Image: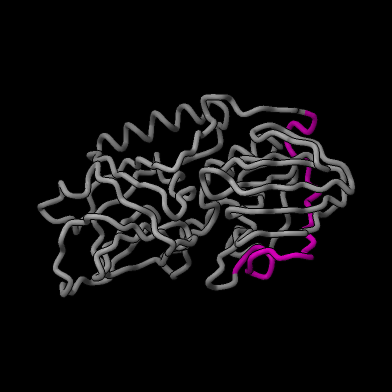
Amino acid sequence: MSLEILQAGPQSTLQATSRNGMRHIGIPASGAADPLSHALGARLVGNDTSCASIEITYGPFEATFRCNARISLTGAISEASVSDQPVAFHETLTVGTGQTLKLGHPTAGLRTYVSVAGGFEGEVFASSPSTYLPAHLGGVDGRALKQGDMLAISEASAKGADEMLKTPSELRLPFTNAFALRATPGPDLPENEIEIWEQNFSATRRASRIGIELDGNFPAIESNRNLPSAGIFPGALQLPPQGRGFLLLPDCQTTGGYPHILQVNRSDRHLMGQIRPGDSVMFLKRAPAEAAVDQKEKQELLSSWMPEFRL
């Protein structure tokens, strides 16, 4: 049981859940840049989120199935077809041996997820098959997918093997080219913090699974401050000396010495993986107690359909 990659786009990798509890030895979380879209795709084909899906950055993407399979498409929406017949996102699809899946460029959002019942097989490192490109860990030889790759599909039984599902409408994410992310102040945010809240920043072309550079009117911070390195996590917004913010994603480093001026809350962190160059990004201030309420409310909504998923 396998899938042959015919076209992989700028960057496609195998991703699943993150590597939690490894940051103290310098191993980043990795995992799906948009873990919610990955989880929705897994739910549609009966997988656990520990099963690997293909994370496609921008597309186009093309692959031929060498077996019958049940699949789903989630994340950034693009034109999609199986053997030149249009197919929909956010529902269980069936494909036959020899049929070819094609995806175009998304009009909004950046990353699309292809999930298959049983999951794609990848190299497991620290209990996860997720690809970490900088250190060549997990996935397929720790690298991005390329033309000619044959991805094995696990024969492990998926839950509800005969179910044909659709994502509930209230859980579908209508991506646009403007993002409003709820965040709490970081430890190094200066007193004139008002400059950062509800202002529009622009995502630059310096973007990867490590992070996204943001251009705009950031608060002034003394560039010659010597800050001790400290633990850092996805969702942190750092402010390097050149004055542009850098928003950290799942492949980010485990420690950092640049000013940490805010932290995107867990309730909205999955959205960061869909920001593309040129998009507008705004931060909405939340106190820690408010952030906890936001997370609880969103978790309750998601748990109604995905009881095992955690933000």
**Residue 121 placement (x, y as % from top left):** 73, 57
Q: Quadrant of residue 183?
A: top left
Q: Nearer the viewer, residue 135 or 78?
A: 78
Q: Is residue 164 above or below residue 36?
A: above
Answer above or below: position of 117 versus 218.
Answer: above
Q: Can you give x and y, in whole percent of width and height, for residue 86 in the image?
A: 75, 36
- At 74% across and 53% down in the image, what residue appears? 62
Question: Measured from the top left, where is residue 102 in percent x and y?
Answer: 74, 48
Q: How is the image coloured?
A: one colour
- Start and end of the magenta stretch? 137-162
Q: Looking at the image, which residue is at 41% across and 46% down?
A: 269
Q: Nearer the viewer, residue 16 or 23?
A: 16
On screen, residue 34 versus residue 186, left or right, reads right
As for residue 189 lying within the magenta part, the answer is no
Magenta stretch, main secondary structure class = loop
Taking the spot 42% from the left edge, 31% from the top edge, the residue there is 298
Image location (x, y in percent) of residue 253: 41, 67
Residue located farthest toward the right when viewing the structure as drawn? 97
Write the residue at 81% across / 48% down.
Answer: 100
Q: Inspect the magenta stretch and tell me whether residue 145 lies in it.
A: yes
Please give left or right for residue 89 compared with residue 243 in the image.
Answer: right
